[in-house]
Image (cartoon, rainbow, N blue to C red):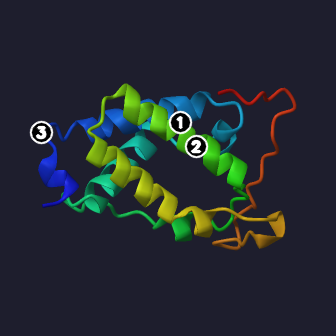
Amino acid sequence: MSVWDELTDTEIIYRINKNFYEKVYEHPWLSLYFVDIDQDFITDQQTRFITGAIGGPNTYSGRMPSNAHPHMYITEELFDIRKKLLEESLEEEKAPESLSATWIKIDESFRRVICKDSINDCEKRYTTDEILAPGKPYNYKKTG
């Protein structure tokens, strides 16, 4: 039995993603990576991704995280900030423990292919790509 099969409320995945991306788009540093990405689009896309990843209908048609992020300079610190926002969203939406644990495990499985030690580790996906490496805002204060 998959985590999907255990869910009594499959809409919770959308609500968690909606809550999560509201936090991301409000975050002074993470939001800089989403300037040109429609929030509703990424919410729907990631809902489809996680639904398929936990055993539900696989309707995701985007890139896998390893292929979507090579041009982005994402540090361990940024990944940890993102993880904290996801954990908050899972908790606030009262996700079942099995969903939370599986979701975080899936998320963590991409850490090593998304995080980079240096901007020099970034690679363009296309010749028209720019390396996306917004620096930490000067007034950024870590919370929590």
At horizontal 74% and vertical 61% (from top left) the residue drawn is 130
Q: For the residue carrying disc 2, how many other residues have a C-alpha within 10 Å: few (<14), some (14-19), or many (20+)?
A: some
Q: Quadrant of the C terminus?
A: top right
- In which quadrant of the rendered view does residue 3 lie? bottom left
Q: Give the image quarter of residue 18.
A: top left
Instruction: Compute the Cα span from label 2 to label 3.
Output: 27 Å
Q: Residue at x 35, y 64 (%)?
A: 61
Residue 8, image x, y percentages:
12, 39
Left or right, 134 with respect to 44, comes to right
Label 1 close to label 3 by CB (< 8 Å):
no
Circle 3 crowding by C-alpha within 10 Å: few under 14, some 14–19, many from 20: few
Quadrant containing the N terminus is bottom left
Residue assigned mark 2: 82
- Amino acid type of the residue that numbered disc 1 sits on in the rendered structure: Leu
Give the answer, above or below, for where 101 lies relative to 9: below
Q: Amino acid at mark 2?
A: Arg
Disc 1 versus disc 3: distance between alpha carbons? Answer: 24 Å
Residue 80 location, x and y as percent? 62, 46
* Residue ID for mark 1: 85
x then y, percent, for residue 34: 60, 43
User: For numbered disc 1, what is the local secondary structure?
Assistant: helix
Residue 8, numbered circle: 3
Q: Amino acid at mark 3?
A: Thr
Relative to 6, is 139 above or below?
A: above
- The residue at the point 58 percent across, 62 percent down is 111
Q: Are marks 1 and 2 in contact (CB under 8 Å)?
A: yes
